[in-house]
Image (cartoon, helix red, strand yellow):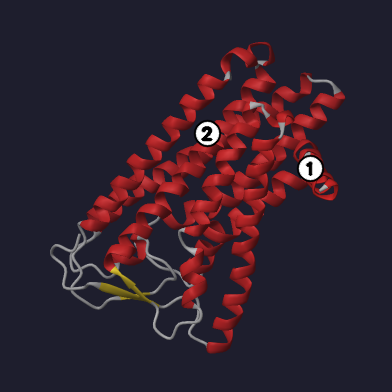
Amino acid sequence: MQQNNSVTEFMLLGLTQDPMRQKMVFVIFLIFYVGTVVGNLLIIVTIKSSRSLGSPMYFFLFYLSLSDSCFSTSTAPRLIADALSAKKIIPYNECMTQVFALHFFGCMQIFVLILMAVDRYVAICKPLHYPTIMRRQVCIILIILAWIGSFIHSIAQIILALRLPFCGPNLIDHYCCDLQPLLKLACMDTYVINLLLVTNSGAICSSSFVILMISYIVILHSLRNHSGEGRKKALSTCTSHIIVVILFFGPCIFIYTRPPTTFPMDKMVAVFYTIGTPFLNPLIYTLRNAEVKNAMRKLWCSKITSESKR
């Protein structure tokens, strides 16, 4: 992994150099990370334990929560640990692993969000064919294809990263390893690689966002033909999905669809979609979804009842 490199480790600048602010970063992002893991695990356990959440929508929500937890884990633990470290050193191999994990689970989120939009489209626009089209075998195949697609995307990213020669300096002005900050340290002309980055990550983000927004516009337009109660339930579900799509894709498009330039806000934008969005997703899907809330309530009431009987 270290061919053509004299650099064996990188030093991350993190979010701030101020000792007091670093302590604030530690506390704030520890809370965010614990909240992300607990919230998404709660959704995972609830979906797996509840018979009422057996529809394809919750099947895909299970994998969204799983990818959310893993996506946040790819960056948050190091950010939290580095907040208390004087030198934020990351070995070369670990840096490349982080690039792979970041893009693998980030791409998985994108594909699952697309599958959730497809599920809602079929459920609302083709209700009579929904049980046939979105049967369990089809959903499993779609999720497997999403994992394969994510792997191919992240392999392409890591190949680009491994082609970059580093001969010093090794100071990354970021809190994690990603291709954009690494391009600035490479001892070569990175124009072609940046073009490939925009073509790969940028195209996936932009095209997926356009597809998702068009699909939800079509879905919302078709809701005019539904009854009042059915329209209200479908609108609530779709609104949750649209909020998640905008929160995730907005920062991604900002980061990955532009020339190799940096802005002061880049790190905060990256924080928002790598840590903020995975933290907000469980809140959005539980607070706006009566079925998930009821299933959680029943699950924990039964747990408390069984414990009290002991």
Residue at position x 34%, y 59% in the image: 179
Residue 193 picture quarter: bottom left
User: What residue would you read off at disc 1?
Assistant: 293
Q: Nearer the viewer, residue 43 or 224?
A: 43
The tally of labels here is 2
Instruction: Tell me: 234 left or right of 113.
Output: right
Q: Amino acid at mark 2?
A: Ile
Residue 153 percent across, percent down from the top left? 35, 43
Asked if residue 305 lies left or right of residue 184, the reply is right
Image location of residue 208, percent across then percent down: 49, 38
Residue 118, by quadrant, is top right
Reply above or below: 296 against 93: above
Residue 37 visible, this angle: yes
Q: Which mark is residue 211?
A: 2
Dot 1 or dot 2, earlier in sequence: 2
- What's the residue at 35%, 53% (across, down)? 100
Query: Considering depth in this image, is 63 or 251 the residue closer to the camera?
Result: 63
Relative to 130, 189 lies left or right: left
* Residue drawn at (53%, 37%) of the image: 112
Q: Position of residue 238 (x, y in %)?
A: 69, 35
The label on residue 195 is none
Q: Are marks 1 and 2 in contact (CB under 8 Å)?
A: no
Q: Residues within 10 Å of mark 2 (few under 14, many from 20)?
A: few
Asked if residue 49 is positioned above or below residue 96 in the image, the reply reads: above
Left or right: 114 in relation to 144:
right
